[in-house]
């Protein structure tokens, strides 16, 4: 609430933010309460050309408007209970994930080529459009494609299979091809403005998150720079998930570890940076025919386990016995 009792819904509602300061904030790329709330005072001050004390005050007011504060564990529990989920199309896979893909969380899908990562991303970008009672969020998706694997034909087939009009379903998916790592990060920066204009966006997909970083920073001598840049990008995505109450899906490749003599010799690309940032990590593996295996590798609130699901002409489904 502002001092006059009016509910704060945008930057212009904040006390002390006149048209002059508002214009400076928007020109600097801070066009929403969420964008301001997660900024540092120093960055906001320099970018918008306003005094540091003014930047600190605006950030504090934006955070209060968005209810960013210390909360009790009971309040956190109530929020988590109300976390929304997107169905994968497979009851078995939904069960493994505690009901589906969560909002306010980043979920990583990693596995070898053909393990079903991209197929699952296509399915989720369709399923998010379903109404709540059918396992969707009645929302839209953003699909950031770094490897050229997006196929409208699959969206069309998956839409028809669940009773959605294909052209309408495709119209609800914002697509962007990222051409390099800097472009990939710039797209995510611009998403804040897009989501502010279209709050129906409830899912952001990056398929795959590591390919450009891997190609542009090869060798051990570039490892530190690559990891720092990748870490920044992942935290960009986490902030989006938390601030806008949406689900973020990233896919990742695997590489062989020749020093592994026992167990699975493949590990996800990205090293420790990707081990720690995503909230839920799911490994996908090929099985016989159209069957795939999904295994929870890391999730603080889910038990370890694995299930079998299938990728059919119609999309992601339960595997037939």
Image: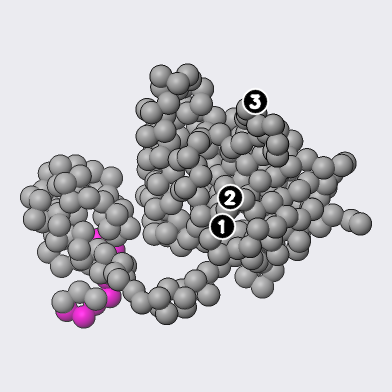
On screen, residue 264 above or below 52:
above
The answer to whether residue 138 of the structure is visible from this angle is no
Q: What residue is rendered at 62% in x and 46% in y? A: 109
Q: Quadrant of residue 37?
A: bottom left
Crowd rating for badge 1 (residues with CA inside 10 Å; few <14, some 14–19, many 20+):
some
Nearest to N terminus: mark 1 or mark 3: 3
Identify the residue shown where x is 44% and y is 44%: 234
Residue that numbered label 1 is attached to: 299
Q: Please identify the quadrant where the C terminus is shown.
A: bottom right
Above/below status of 84 relative to 152: below
Measure the C-alpha gap from mark 3 to mark 2: 23 Å
Label placed on residue 258 = 3
6 falls in the magenta region: yes
Tell me the SS state at disc 1. Answer: loop
In percent of width and height, residue 204 lies at: 52, 49
Q: Residue at x 70, y 64 (%)?
A: 95
Q: How many marks?
A: 3
Sequence-earlier tag: 1 or 2: 2
**Measured along the vertical axis of the image, is residue 75 above or below residue 192?**
below
Which residue position is annotated with label 2? 281
Magenta part of the protein: which range?
4-11
- Point out residue 237 in the picture as x, y percentages from the top left corner: 44, 48
Residue 281: where, in percent of width, then height?
58, 50
Query: Does 155 lie within the magenta span?
Result: no
**Mark earlier in primary sequence (3, 2):** 3
Contact, mark 1 vs mark 2 (Cβ under 8 Å): yes
Please, what secondary structure does the residue beneath circle 3 have? loop
């Amino acid at each position: 609430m502002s001092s006059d009792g009016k509910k704060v819904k945008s930057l212009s509602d904040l006390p002390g933010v006149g048209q002059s300061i508002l214009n400076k904030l928007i020109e600097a790329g801070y066009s929403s309460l969420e964008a301001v709330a997660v900024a540092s005072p120093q960055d906001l001050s320099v970018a918008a050309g306003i005094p540091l004390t003014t930047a600190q005050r605006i950030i504090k007011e934006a955070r209060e408007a968005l209810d960013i504060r210390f909360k009790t564990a009971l309040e956190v529990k109530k929020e988590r209970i109300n976390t929304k989920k997107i169905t994968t199309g497979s009851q078995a896979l939904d069960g493994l994930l505690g009901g589906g893909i969560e909002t306010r969380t980043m979920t990583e899908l990693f596995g070898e080529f053909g393990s079903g990562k991209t197929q699952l991303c296509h399915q989720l970008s369709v399923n998010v459009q379903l109404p709540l009672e059918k396992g969707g969020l009645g929302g839209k998706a953003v699909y950031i494609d770094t490897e050229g694997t997006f196929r409208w034909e699959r969206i069309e087939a998956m839409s028809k299979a669940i009773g959605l009009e294909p052209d309408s379903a495709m119209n609800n998916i914002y697509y962007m091809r990222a051409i390099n790592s800097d472009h990939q990060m710039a797209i995510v920066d611009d998403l804040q403005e897009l989501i502010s204009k279209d709050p129906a966006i409830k899912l952001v997909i990056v398929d795959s998150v590591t390919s450009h970083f891997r190609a542009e920073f090869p060798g051990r001598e570039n490892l530190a720079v690559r990891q720092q840049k990748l870490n920044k990008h992942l935290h960009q995505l986490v902030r989006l998930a938390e601030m806008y109450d949406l689900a973020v899906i990233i896919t990742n490749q695997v590489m062989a570890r020749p020093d592994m003599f026992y167990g699975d010799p493949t590990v996800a690309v990205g090293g420790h940076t990707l081990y720690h940032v995503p909230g839920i990590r799911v490994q996908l593996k090929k099985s016989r025919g159209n069957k795939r295996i999904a295994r929870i590798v890391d999730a603080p609130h889910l038990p370890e386990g694995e299930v079998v699901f299938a990728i059919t002409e119609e999309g992601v489904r339960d595997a037939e016995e």
